Amino acid sequence: MPAATRTTIAGIAAEVGVSVPTVSKVLNGRPDVAPATRALVEESIARHGYQRREAKGKRRSAPRLVELVFHEYGAPWAVEIIRGVEAVAGPARVGVVLSELGGEHRPRQEWLDDVLARRPLGVILVLSDLGAEQRRQLETRSIPFVVVDTAGEPPPGVPTVGSANWNGGLVATRHLLGLGHRRVAVISGPSDVMCSRARIDGYRSAFDEAGVPFDPELVRYGDFFVGGGYRHGRELLTRPDRPTAIFAGSDFQALGVLRAARELGLRVPEDLSVVGYDDLPMTEWIGPALTTVRQPLLEMASTATRIVLSLAEGEQPSNLRIDLATELIVRESTSAPPSI
Amino acid sequence: MPAATRTTIAGIAAEVGVSVPTVSKVLNGRPDVAPATRALVEESIARHGYQRREAKGKRRSAPRLVELVFHEYGAPWAVEIIRGVEAVAGPARVGVVLSELGGEHRPRQEWLDDVLARRPLGVILVLSDLGAEQRRQLETRSIPFVVVDTAGEPPPGVPTVGSANWNGGLVATRHLLGLGHRRVAVISGPSDVMCSRARIDGYRSAFDEAGVPFDPELVRYGDFFVGGGYRHGRELLTRPDRPTAIFAGSDFQALGVLRAARELGLRVPEDLSVVGYDDLPMTEWIGPALTTVRQPLLEMASTATRIVLSLAEGEQPSNLRIDLATELIVRESTSAPPSI
């Protein structure tokens, strides 16, 4: 295998038996190349470890963009992430292009083709992962990427910015146990998402630490949305042995739990303590003001943006995995359990 | 003055006494042109009514982008606007570039230069206006723009998408008067923003219609944020002749009013009725679920995106001003006034 630096577009064109502009088109995600040709070119690019390096002058004259990609759009915390990215990209005069992975209307390869065509400085993926093939396509075009809050175990070498989810689960549960609660339910995000699993493990550790057994029936996985919080909340709170506290996976889930409690005539915090997660701006305004685990979404997004821009400058970050601290914010929705 | 179609870049270069590439750089918002030269080129472009028309092939190969510009970032309803734009831009495989006008870190001309450099298909401005000079710069580059929810009176010829604000103010106030309220306060957005004024006029009309005088002391202008709702709410509710109902300018303002009421020991809706504005997803979940005026933010954004993309295709929209309907959604936060 020849050294990566010596492979050229012309060499790849010659090997595959196509023209140089055809190789360029593939590199730029252009649609006007036959799928079979394209596959051959991609295969040759990958085999040679080819990496495009832009001429300095050319790079500077092209529009400076970063791609911000959400797994699922319109999540309530998306606005915090967007603000965090803009806080760094704005002053650097880098445009932020938004998109969503996995939407029905935008198949994955089309999405990647569009990204390649825009030739961004870098890509920021939120709660989403690329396949190995897609990662390679970005790498061969020298487009760095960073994952914010990885869904699964991130592959080696991929920079990630997250927050201390395990610790968040621990401090929230410790707070509730410390108030005297024993029947503490937890509603987390999907079980295949890392941050959900880490929080549940933190919850378990708090029980272990206190020497109190926990009831596996009170551990629920769901989504991060308000409707899921409501449904799990109703189900948990209509049990004969209902919990006296619920630790929700997001502030919106907690909002659903609060509504379920209201409908069932349970007062918060007198009859039920509720802890949220995220500390969205609205949580201090709702009634009762929500005790929640602050997740520094804005800072996570700013950090990811700084990393991707420095990678674009050819710098290597000193740390590939950064987890920012989480913090328990105690407000009005938690208190000692009712004395029955 | 020669016919607009006959002016060329070469002609402008010759007239100003600069090279053709220099004129191109000015058209593309590139920073490497002396300000004085740039001003001369802009002046000549404007005087000749020059408009760049892209070669069809070139346009097609360039990344397809639209610019989405907020006056003020991170407003709670921004996510609805973004979802609406994405709903149209996503399936059309057009990238959405986000930015904010008026942030300290991004002076206006720098912002416009960056937009010109990205050569987008079009620009969508939310609650913000361009100056005459900036409008002309977009026009000469054949970059169409649409304003969503104009701040001021839009200049002739600029397509706008809004909602029936006057009607929203009317139906909300009619609802409260119909329940028997007489002391109805209104907290609106800034007095220099069209939608605030239209809603207050709707409020006044409802009073006129009912033959009831309104108290000008109960009419407040503020911002659309939660803190302003809280401050105005506290002030109104601590008056000796406090209102029995408050019509807020946004759901977040209403959240601030609800908190002020809670702190003062006033029950909603028994002691105080509250109406919000926007119908954000959270409003049906908070306690009490909020009566509010639904503003079709998502549809407004989708409509604006469709208009800007069809303008980019050279089509002329049949209607330059579109106002989508608003609708009163009655939930739990309004009832008859306390019988004192």
Image (spheres, coloured by chain):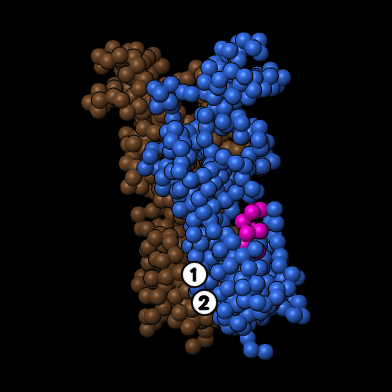
Chain colours: A brown, B blue
* Amino acid at pointer 1: Ile
Toward which corner of the image does residue A25 lie, by quadrant? Answer: top left
Q: In x, y percent, where is residue A249? A: 46, 62
- The x, y position of residue A10, in whole percent, is 34, 12
Circle 2 sits on which residue? B332
Question: Three-letter amino acid code at disc 2?
Answer: Glu
Helix, strand or loop status at disc 1: strand
The chain carrying label 2 is: B
Q: Which chain is home to disc 1?
A: B
Residue A13, image x, y percentages: 30, 15
Q: Which residue is mark 1?
A: B329
Numbered marks: total: 2
- Disc 1 vs disc 2: which is toward the camera? 1
Is A178 displayed left or right of B65 in the figure?
right
Q: Residue at x 56, y 31 (%)?
A: B139
> What distance separates the C-alpha of mark 1 from that of mark 2?
10 Å
- Residue at image position (32%, 36%) is A109
Q: Which mark is residue B210?
A: none
Please say if A327 is above or below A291: above
Write down the region rendered in magenta.
B193-200
Q: Whole-percent x and y of residue B219?
A: 71, 67
Which one is in front, B300 or B228?
A: B300
Q: Residue at x 71, y 65 (%)?
A: B220
Give the structural element (helix, strand or loop) at label 2: loop
- The image quarter in which residue A157 lies: top left
Q: Relative to residue B134, is residue A277 depicted above or below?
A: below
Of all residues, the one furthest to the left in this rendering is A36
